[in-house]
Image (cartoon, grey):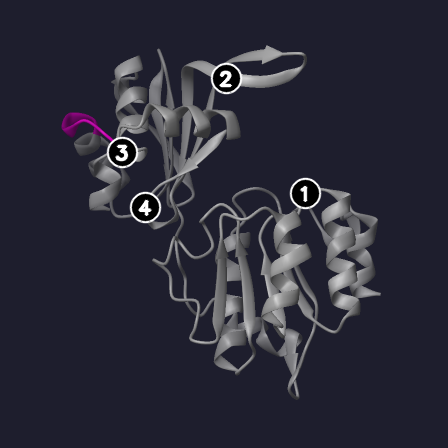
Amino acid sequence: MDELRKLFFDDVWEEISKSAKPFPLSEIRIRVGKRIRCAAGGKFFYVSKIAGEKDVSRVLDVATGYSAYSASDAALKGYLHYYGGVRIGITGEGVTDGGKLMNVKSVSSLCIRIPTDAAGVFEKLADSVFSCGAVKNTAIVSPPFGGKTTMLRDMVRFASKTGKNVLVLDERYELSGSGTFDLGENTDVMLGASKSVFFENVVRSMNPDVIAVDEIYAEREAEELVKIANSGIKIFYTVHGGSLGRLEFSDAKKLFD
């Protein structure tokens, strides 16, 4: 929490932290010219502060170590990561060339997502995934803010505790919290790599029993998961959706046939 408070001016942080108590913060949204909106305990609230450009600059400066290059690179990607798995989404005015995004100037909105850990949440479901030493391919499907990453993190811990070698792709530094969260002594973590690099190179070299991937978005990613599963490696992954029956990716459904 000390690292999080550094992103804000003292008066702003004081109001945010007081308003959130006793619940942990899960999200803070800063929009230039509008009140700062926060989420905690499943509810949202506003603080009286009207955000200005200096509030946005403060967050970006601290999160990037006052590096203009890092801030520009983060804006192009649409997000940057901060201590403890905090992810900061970025929007503003895009500068394009030939249809390609070249720069983002005048950043106007930030979405600061704060991960939470809940050790033990998976235990009641463990028998449906682990049985007599065997592990089932498992998808965690829910709308945004449904706790998918929190559940996946605890599944990884559980699998590691059973002695399985677990390989985690933490593409956006949320699953492991950049090392903040304990994922178990039999877990290996690949930080910051793209899914294509992870699927093509890392999985083959690390020889895991189980891999865990957060947020499958594209059909090609689902296709890669099927290939990996066909080699005998078990898959844990998350995907946005209302139910498995309405899962968007047809290839991902093959994991459960």
**As rendered, which of 30 and 223 lies closer to the eye?**
223
Amino acid type shown at disc 1: Tyr
Q: Point out the tag, 4 or 1, that comes first from the N-terminus.
A: 4
Q: Point out the tag, 1 or 3, that comes first from the N-terminus.
A: 3
Query: Residue 237, how many percent across, how many down?
Result: 63, 57
Q: Residue at x 44, y 67 (%)?
A: 183
Q: Point out the tag, 3 or 2, that comes first from the N-terminus.
A: 3
Relative to residue 238, is residue 88 drawn left or right? left
Q: Give yes or no for contact between labels 4 and 1 (Cβ–Cβ under 8 Å).
A: no
Query: Residue 143, how many percent across, how many down?
Result: 61, 43
Q: Which residues are magenta?
A: 7-12
Query: Residue 149, how many percent across, how many down?
Result: 52, 54
Q: Where 121 falls versus 33 (above or below)? A: below
Q: Which mark is residue 83?
A: 4
Q: Where 176 falls versus 3 (above or below)? A: below
- Closer to us: mark 4 or mark 2? 2
Q: Point out the tag, 2 or 1, that comes first from the N-terminus.
A: 2
**As rendered, which of 39 and 105 lies closer to the eye?**
105
Q: Report the Cα–Cα distance between label 4 and label 1.
A: 25 Å
Amino acid type shown at disc 2: Asn
Q: Point out the tag, 3 or 4, that comes first from the N-terminus.
A: 3
Secondary structure of the residue carrying tag 2 is strand
